[in-house]
Image (tube, helix red, strand yellow):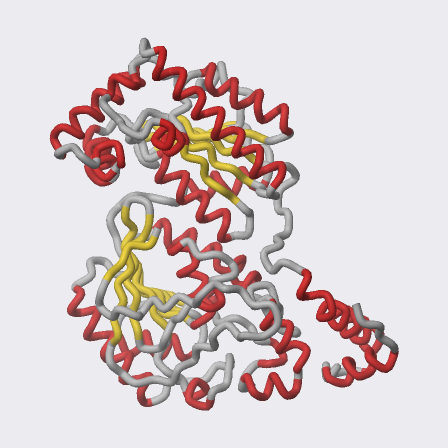
């Protein structure tokens, strides 16, 4: 570590362009702190996160096969990671497949199959050992234990494990008696399961239905009386009804609120930025300018695109900024304005070019390059702040069916990171070009992405990850590399 003096502090203070003499002391301290941080930054992991839980939480799924437990587990994991709670899913079925390379038939799951019971019990214990490693050693805050856990004895074992390690347990039970929903789940998800890779569809369905029967004989649902001391949510018939019991902390309450908003109704979410703005042409960030001529042309083509798509009951959302509102106005449809969808606040850097920021605030410019996700503009916001601001938008998107969101570059990156399960490190570098529409269609365990370029020229506002200091090897994600082609992102 290099020595530094008041001379260094004065130099950094001068570069930071403090705005009022009355704030001299606090500003000098902030500059000193940032200077010290820059000296150390190469030793700090950008993946460090703030602890958002008092103690680690173990989420435990409960339910018969084909009840959507893995769907719930994956969505919960994606949501919690997105809001900044380090979470990992542990699917016991995957442990069983790794242990038992070749699946033969439902006979393995018969309750009187002692060898099968022994293997399944060992797989569950192996998964719990990995849960302990993740929560107690690796710094995870939430683990999702995805298995049937249909007996009270199995759940008691998990509770004892959690108590011994100081974890809180929250059960998520999915109960479904609708034969159409069960059949749909089997066809959409289970037929692609590695267990049935060499079977035809009819054989796979027949075997899986017999597997469900093996579990039904010993299934003990969570009981309002016998399990009154446990924390849980019971989801009945894919969200038609809920039973919630003993929610004890804010993480559990957020889990409950999230699970009460998701649905499985087929739909698509369309995301795009506003048309090119006057400030975009000038290379200036932020601001509240109107559309350029090319931006207006994009809005007209967007109107034609939506007509061609013939989307049923489409809702349109915009921010409260001119460029998104003007884009929606040209569509000639009703729309809803969300302040939460406003672009990231660049604070003192609003309406500046990146070159100007680098010249006037070199320290701020360098800090942002080191950790773009957590860096907060002076008097402005960070991407981390923006994610928190957008959480209500995500909740409402999960509740809705077909929606078009007309927003901004940073906002679009945050929304995409949620739906495509991107990390905080990847999020600020997702490529979201102007005059391009992204169509997201939820599928079994992920999201299908289609990209449509509407062939209107626009400036490129992408700033790639800089090659300075300690850089990550992670590549930027270009979601428009294959225009009008689709891919499934898991």
The residue sitting at 18% across, 65% down in the picture is 309
The residue sitting at 80% across, 72% down in the picture is 32
Quarter of the image with the N terminus in it: bottom right
Quarter where residue 111 is shown: top left
User: Relative to the observer, which residue lies in front, 123 or 67?
Assistant: 123
User: Relative to the observer, which residue lies in front, 336 or 392?
Assistant: 392
Report if residue 209 is visible in the image: yes
The residue sitting at 60% across, 60% down in the picture is 46
Residue 452 placement, left or right of 227: left
Quarter where residue 483 is shown: bottom left
Q: Position of residue 286 (x, y in %)?
A: 51, 79
Relative to 257, is 426 above or below? below
User: Relative to the observer, which residue lies in front, 418 or 105?
Assistant: 105
Relative to 89, is 287 above or below? below
Q: Position of residue 23 (x, y in %)?
A: 80, 77
Which residue, as the protein is rendered here, is positioned at the far top? 112
Residue 311 placement, left or right of 461: left
Residue 305 placement, left or right of 113: left
Residue 186 placement, left or right of 132: left
Which residue, as the protein is rendered here, is positioned at the far right? 6
Q: Position of residue 438 (x, y in %)?
A: 30, 66
Q: Position of residue 479 (x, y in %)?
A: 34, 66
Report if residue 244 is visible in the image: no
Q: Give the number of marks.
A: 0
Quarter where residue 198 is shown: top left
């Amino acid at each position: 570590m290099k020595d530094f003096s008041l001379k260094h502090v004065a130099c950094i203070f001068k570069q930071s362009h403090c705005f009022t003499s009355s704030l001299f002391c606090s500003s000098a301290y902030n500059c000193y702190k940032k200077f010290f941080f820059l000296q150390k930054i190469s030793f700090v992991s950008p993946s460090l996160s703030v602890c958002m839980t008092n103690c680690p939480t173990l989420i435990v799924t409960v339910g018969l096969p084909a009840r959507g437990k893995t769907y719930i587990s994956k969505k919960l994991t994606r949501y919690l990671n997105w809001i900044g709670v380090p979470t990992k899913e542990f699917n016991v079925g995957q442990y069983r497949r790794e242990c038992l390379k070749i699946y033969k038939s439902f006979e393995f799951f018969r309750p009187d199959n002692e060898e099968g019971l022994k293997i399944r019990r060992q797989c569950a214990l192996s998964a719990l050992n990995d849960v302990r490693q993740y929560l107690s050693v690796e710094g995870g805050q939430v683990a999702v234990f995805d298995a049937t856990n249909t007996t009270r004895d199995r759940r008691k074992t998990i509770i004892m494990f959690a108590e011994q390690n100081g974890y809180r347990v929250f059960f998520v039970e999915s109960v479904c008696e609708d034969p159409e929903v069960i059949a749909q789940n089997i066809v959409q998800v289970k037929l692609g399961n590695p267990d049935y890779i060499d079977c035809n569809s009819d054989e796979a369905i027949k075997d899986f239905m017999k597997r469900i029967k093996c579990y039904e004989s010993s299934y003990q649902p969570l009981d309002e009386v016998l399990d009154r001391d446990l924390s849980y949510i019971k989801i009945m018939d894919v969200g038609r009804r809920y039973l919630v019991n003993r929610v004890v902390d804010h993480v559990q309450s957020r889990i409950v609120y999230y699970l009460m908003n998701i649905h499985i109704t087929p739909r698509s979410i369309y995301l795009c930025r506003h048309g090119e703005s006057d400030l975009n042409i000038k290379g200036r960030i932020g601001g509240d300018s109107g559309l350029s001529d090319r931006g207006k042309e994009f809005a007209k083509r967007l109107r034609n695109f939506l007509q061609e798509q013939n989307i049923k009951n489409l809702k349109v959302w915009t921010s409260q900024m001119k460029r998104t509102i003007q884009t929606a106005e040209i569509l000639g449809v009703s729309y809803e304005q969300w302040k939460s969808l406003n672009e990231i606040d660049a604070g003192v850097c609003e309406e500046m070019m990146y070159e100007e920021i680098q010249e006037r605030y070199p320290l701020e410019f360098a800090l942002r390059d080191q950790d773009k996700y957590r860096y907060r503009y002076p008097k402005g916001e960070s991407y981390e702040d923006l994610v928190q601001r957008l959480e209500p938008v995500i909740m409402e998107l999960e509740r809705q069916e077909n929606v078009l969101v007309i927003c901004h570059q940073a906002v679009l990156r945050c929304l995409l990171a949620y739906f495509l399960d991107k990390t905080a490190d990847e999020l600020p570098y997702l490529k979201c070009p102007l005059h391009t529409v992204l169509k997201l269609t939820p599928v079994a365990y992920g999201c299908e992405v289609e990209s449509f370029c509407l062939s209107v020229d626009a400036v490129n506002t992408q700033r790639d990850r800089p090659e300075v200091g300690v850089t990550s090897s992670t590549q930027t994600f270009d979601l428009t590399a294959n225009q009008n082609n689709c891919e499934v992102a898991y």
